[in-house]
Image (tube, grey):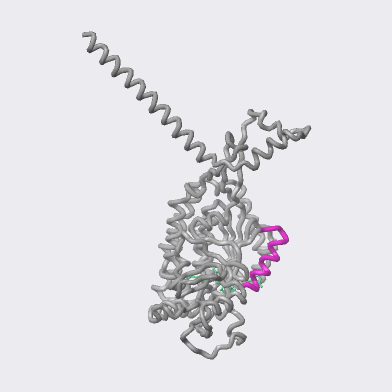
Amino acid sequence: MSRERQAVERARKAFLTGRSKPLDYRIGQLKSLQRFVVERQKDISDALKKDLNKSKLGTPLYETLGLEGEILLAVNKLAEWAAPRPVEKNLLTLSDQVFIQPEPLGVVLIIGAWNYPWAVTIQPLIGAIAAGNAAVVKPSEVSAHTSKVMEELLPLYLDKEMYPVVTGGVPETQELLKQRFDHIFYTGNSTVGKLVMEAASRHLTPVTLELGGKSPCYIDKDCDITIACRRITWGKYTNCGQTCIAPDYILSPTVLRDVKPDAKVMQEEIFGPLLPIITVSGVDDAIRFINEREKPLALYVFSQDNKTSSGGVLANDCLVHFSVSALPFGGVGNSGMGSYHGKFGFDQLSHLRGCLIKKLGMEGVNQMRYPPHTAKKLDWARFFILKQVDVARVGRMAMLALLAVIAAVVLQVRIKKNNRALHANCVQ
Ligand SMILES: NC(=O)c1ccc[n+]([C@@H]2O[C@H](COP(=O)([O-])OP(=O)(O)OC[C@H]3O[C@@H](n4cnc5c(N)ncnc54)[C@H](O)[C@@H]3O)[C@@H](O)[C@H]2O)c1
Ligand SMILES: CCCCCCCC=O
């Protein structure tokens, strides 16, 4: 049996024990992950220095502080996220319990990319742990030192049966992709994303694909060009331009540069320190240009107008929407599917189970669905199904009416009491 298959089977066996389901276990694992990030900061930054020449201070800023924030959020909010979520009732479910119960999916495969190897590999793991899943973690072989640190040190902190790390390159990833998972979370380029989805389809496994693409940046003539240039330059050249949401090209009405729309640099994601500038005649021309191409992961607008589609949109800045846990992060079309960060990561890796709990009584209400079907029963069904009643509002109004009745009764009792006292005084 291959090493990859063994890891998946171990993770499944661990999941089937049920120990990842209680919230205490999940919080314990998340806190251990937090301890790992803090205690092993030097191992992490040394590995990143060797892999990608990232600086010692850049490591917390761009890789691990975000992870710590996400872990803290998950620890603090887990009880709320995992609790049953009551939904609106209708006339047919008035006396029932109707709610959504987030459930763990099972075993999740996380395939990470090399450019921010900690952020994009461990962040999905936080969602997987919080949602009560087991997870097989496959870091990118390109950032080999990081991959080794994950393989050697993570098992010292986490439940190693539940969260095994499998290292290796394309053959190992492909061997993993032959196995059955309950969800595959892949971060990387769109070409491999299609292979991942194809492999997942063999088991009808759902996928999250965090891909890349050409994120446009539109600068309107009315913006503060000095600030815009500073923010765009930071967004582009951070990590040598190797950021999934780096502004890929600029559309700017007042700047003229000689880049043709059909030039090679405009065909594929650049993922490097090159920033072509395309001249457009105005906002409508920019929108047409963007909409004619694949849907990008991010869209940057240094202006007020927005009539385009993209994974995310950020006005008057670059990259920083990635760090907002309250926003879903993910692509659309060619830039991916599914989203994560904060509660979105928890939901993405949960099964949101619809629950309707009925009582065995009140059988009279059900008569309309039992044969023989009659025109009268159909009329009742039409009424119950089509009548749009805001049950919560009706409940609030009933409560108000009840309070009014209570107030009236109290008032009457008081008046009677006062009258009796007055009467007694008069008699004396
Ligand atoms: N949306 C995001 O959050 C995000 C984050 C980082 C990078 N990206 C995108 O990822 C791309 C850069 O990463 P990359 O793709 O070069 O990363 P990569 O080379 O590290 O590959 C990603 C993963 O895919 C696996 N892989 C590669 N080829 C494979 C194959 N043929 N079959 C099966 N598995 C295979 C690798 O083992 C690795 O774990 C860019 O397009 C970038 O925009 C997206
Ligand atoms: C605050 C910037 C972090 C960017 C991380 C992007 C991950 C994708 O390449």
Main SS of residues in magenta: helix
Residue 110 occupies which quadrant of the picture? bottom right
> Could you say where residue 326 lies in the image, as x and y percent from the top left?
46, 59
At 51% across and 77% down in the image, what residue appears?
Answer: 283
Q: Is residue 196 rendered magenta in the image?
A: yes
> Could you say where residue 101 lies in the image, as x and y percent from the top left?
57, 45
> Could you say where residue 347 lies in the image, as x and y percent from the top left?
55, 54
Query: In the orientation shown, which residue stands out farthest toward the front?
Result: 426
Asked whether 340 or 309 is in front, the reply is 309
Q: Is residue 246 rendered magenta in the image?
A: no
At 58% across and 77% down in the image, what residue appears?
Answer: 288
Asked whether 49 or 57 is in front, the reply is 57
Query: In the orientation shown, which residue stands out farthest toward the top?
Result: 428
**19 relative position to 379: left or right:** left
Q: Please tell me whether residue 138 is drawn above or below residue 357 in the rendered image.
A: below
Image quarter hosting the N terminus: bottom right
Image quarter hosting the C terminus: top left
**219 relative position to 359: left or right:** left
Residue 54 occupies which quadrant of the picture? bottom left
Bounds of the magenta segment: 190-205
Query: In the orientation shown, which residue stands out farthest toward the bottom?
Result: 258
**311 relative position to 33: left or right:** right
Residue 384 occupies which quadrant of the picture? top right
> Could you say where residue 140 lies in the image, as x and y percent from the top left?
57, 71
* Residue 161 visible, this angle: no
Asked whether 179 or 97 is in front, the reply is 97
* Residue 129 visible, this angle: yes
Q: Please tell me whether residue 364 is drawn above or below residue 175 in the rendered image.
A: above
